[in-house]
Image: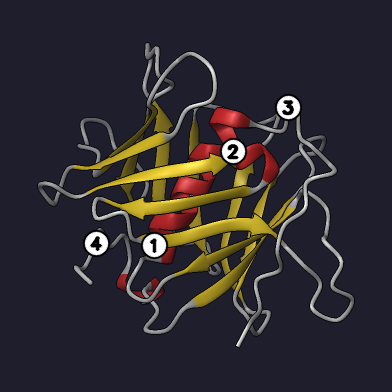
Amino acid sequence: MKQGLVVDAGFVYKQETQLTVLKTSLFFANDGFTVYDPKGVLVFRVDSYGPDTRDRGEIVLMDANGRCLLTVRRKRPSLHNRWEGFKGERREGQKPIFSVRRSSIIGRSSVNVEVYENQGEEYQIDGNFRQRCCTICNAEKESMAEIRRKVDASTNVVLGKDVLSLCLKPGFDGAFAMGLVLVLDQIYGDDAFAESVQVEPITED
């Protein structure tokens, strides 16, 4: 499988890996996301997210130590709700490494991802993020990552909508994938979330 965009090589796994993404409440300051590997070790975090943030149109993904890995920023104006990704903490005049946009402004649509550094590299995100059920595919229609609701392995119970499973295929950068999750969350939010959706559990090795 061809190597895709790498935001940080330290988060490219040789084996299929399932990360747990926990979204915190938006009613308190310093809300955001925390992301854990299969052993429960903190991998990523997003602190600058919520009602008290300086710019709701810009979100920074950090590693467990607070190092800035990726900034996603909404491009304005944009009919297709376009977002752009920048390596590290975005600087004035810095060029984006990828962009994300809805394929259509009307009705349900897929999301297209264009990578600028590697000519011809692109991805399509199909499914329904509000139901926490979508797949990130490359140009060859190969699944690179899947977003699902988290299933408790001991009880086989689907957890709440704020706990996600991000399943990464070998070689697909987890930081890039998490950046896409942040953008999807901004585009679609939690409106019209169907609590009754049933999701097949993703088993961990």
Instruction: Give the structural element (helix, strand or loop) at label 4.
Output: loop
Q: CA distance from mark 2 to mark 4?
A: 22 Å
Name the residue tied to disc 2.
Answer: 185
Instruction: Give the structural element (helix, strand or loop) at label 2.
Output: helix
* Residue placed most toward the observer, 86 or 3: 3
Mark 2 is on which residue type? Asp
Relative to 136, residue 84 above or below: above
Number of numbered callouts drawn: 4
Residue 73 in view in this figure: yes
- For image coordinates 60% across by 88% down, the residue present is 205
- For image coordinates 60% across by 41% down, the residue present is 129
Name the residue tied to disc 3.
Answer: 191
Label ID, residue 31: none
Name the residue tied to disc 4.
Answer: 4
Q: Residues within 10 Å of mark 4 (few under 14, many from 20)?
A: some
Instruction: Give the structural element (helix, strand or loop) at label 3.
Output: loop
- For image coordinates 35% across by 67% down, the residue present is 172
Q: Is residue 177 left or right of residue 38?
A: left
Label ID, residue 144: 1
Q: CA distance from mark 1 to mark 4?
A: 10 Å
Mark 3 is on which residue type? Asp
| Rendered image quadrant of residue 104 | top left
Name the spot of residue 197 as percent of width and height, x first.
78, 46
Name the spot of residue 176 as percent of width and height, x first.
39, 56
